[in-house]
């Protein structure tokens, strides 16, 4: 069992997507596949809208000197499609012995009525050696033991329920907030970097190692929701962990929290 004392609560800031036109699952899927292919070669240029913004670890950066603009040998990927926000979230694991990464990338698109969507913003959490519990090989072994397949309709939750579950978890985590009711599942497994709360058994619990003292809230939450996957991605800032740039991904099955994956950037030079 892993006892990890970081936390936070309340204060929700939502970045509103600039997208207004329709984004279909098919066009988001095609865009996410373009992104993955381009990430493999390090050439994402053709996909950008003219007003493109790049955020890496909660800082505006020059995309051309970013980790995402260099070729990465992707070992694992998993993507959420959000037709309402016109956005995707992709979890990447890179176990390249030269340099390992866990990367959580929210990509916001605009529909300019062309044949494909254009990227208006990339908001990436890039974690590597030196970050919270980082070990990409170990993370990969846990991820490969989990089931992240699309859910049958009967096991899906509403967008509102998914968002409230993510917020309740993040609220509980900081302020020891008695009103934050997380619908814990059994089993539930939480992976923080490469630290795992469970053992892959039917009694695994995520309701462990929750801080019991009041801590600074975690803020600047940005959401991508995929009802068909039962998943919510939240990028945020963990103020109580030296303002760490952070990614939390939640998977909810039959109304109960099943998996939590986190990436928390602790390097002072990130
Ligand atoms: C853009 O929006 C239009 C109008 O809603 C829609 O018909 C079209 O499929 C969308 N394009 C993409 C690439 O999603
Ligand atoms: C980084 O996070 C803080 C919240 O702690 C937020 O106020 C700030 O705007 C963020 N920076 C960027 C570039 O978004
Ligand atoms: C990256 O550099 C190229 C060539 O200098 C430039 O055309 C492009 O606009 C830059 N891309 C971004 C996203 O800054
Ligand atoms: C990419 O990684 C795989 C193993 O995950 C390895 O077999 C392959 O050689 C790597 N390719 C490059 C170009 O490094
Ligand atoms: C992404 O993952 C899917 C399986 O989920 C795989 O089929 C695909 O080849 C992967 N793409 C890349 C670029 O690694
Ligand atoms: C990462 O975890 C693996 C076990 O999955 C272990 O063999 C390896 O030594 C770890 N690497 C580091 C740098 O701790
Ligand atoms: C407590 O959690 C609830 C549910 O997530 C939230 O609505 C409320 O704002 C939180 N209050 C405090 C003081 O953290």
Image (spheres, rainbow, N blue to C red):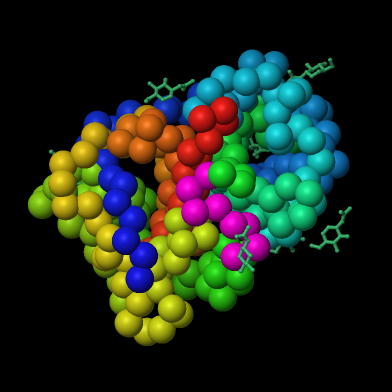
Q: Residue at x 77, y 55 (%)?
A: 97
Question: Which quarter of the figure has residue 71?
Answer: top right
Asked whether residue 244 is drawn in magenta, I would say no
Tally the marks.
0
Q: Can residue 251 be seen at all in this image of the molecule?
A: no
Q: Can residue 223 be seen at all in this image of the molecule?
A: yes
Q: Is residue 123 left or right of residue 227?
A: right
User: Residue 248 appears at what percent x and percent y?
Assistant: 43, 49
Rendered position, 78 above or below 56 = below
Q: Residue at x 68, y 60 (%)?
A: 76
Rendered position, 39 above or below 199 = above
Q: Residue at x 71, y 36 (%)?
A: 68
User: Residue 18 appears at what percent x and percent y?
Assistant: 51, 24
- 121 and 144: which is toward the camera: 144
**In which of the image's four quarters is ligand 4 placed?**
bottom right
Q: What is the magenta range?
A: 131-138
Q: Quadrant of the N terminus?
A: bottom left
Question: Which quarter of the figure has residue 270?
Answer: top right
- 60 and 132: which is toward the camera: 132
- 95 and 9: which is toward the camera: 95
- 42 and 156: which is toward the camera: 42
């Amino acid at each position: 069992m892993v006892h990890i004392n970081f936390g936070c609560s309340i204060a929700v800031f939502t970045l509103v997507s600039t997208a207004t036109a329709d984004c279909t699952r098919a066009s988001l899927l095609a865009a996410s596949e373009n992104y993955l292919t381009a990430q493999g070669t390090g050439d994402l240029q053709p996909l950008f809208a003219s007003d493109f913004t790049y955020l890496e670890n909660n800082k505006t950066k020059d995309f051309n000197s970013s980790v995402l603009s260099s070729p990465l040998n992707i070992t694992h990927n998993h993507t959420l499609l959000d037709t309402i926000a016109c956005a995707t979230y992709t979890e990447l694991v890179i176990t390249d012995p030269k340099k390992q990464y866990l990367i959580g990338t929210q990509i916001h698109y605009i529909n300019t009525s062309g044949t494909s969507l254009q990227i208006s913003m990339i908001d990436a959490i890039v974690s590597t050696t030196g970050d919270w519990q980082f070990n990409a090989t170990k993370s990969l072994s846990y991820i490969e033991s989990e089931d992240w397949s699309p859910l049958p309709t009967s096991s899906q939750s509403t967008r509102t329920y998914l968002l409230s579950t993510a917020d309740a978890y993040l609220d509980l985590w900081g302020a020891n907030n008695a009103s934050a009711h997380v619908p814990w599942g059994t089993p539930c497994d939480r992976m923080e970097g490469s630290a795992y709360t469970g053992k892959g058994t039917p009694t695994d619990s995520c309701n462990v190692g929750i801080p019991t003292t009041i801590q600074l809230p975690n803020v600047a939450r940005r959401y991508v929701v995929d009802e068909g996957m039962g998943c919510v991605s939240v990028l945020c800032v963990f103020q109580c962990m030296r303002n760490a740039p952070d990614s939390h991904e939640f998977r909810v099955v039959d109304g109960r929290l099943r998996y939590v994956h986190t990436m928390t950037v602790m390097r002072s030079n990130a």
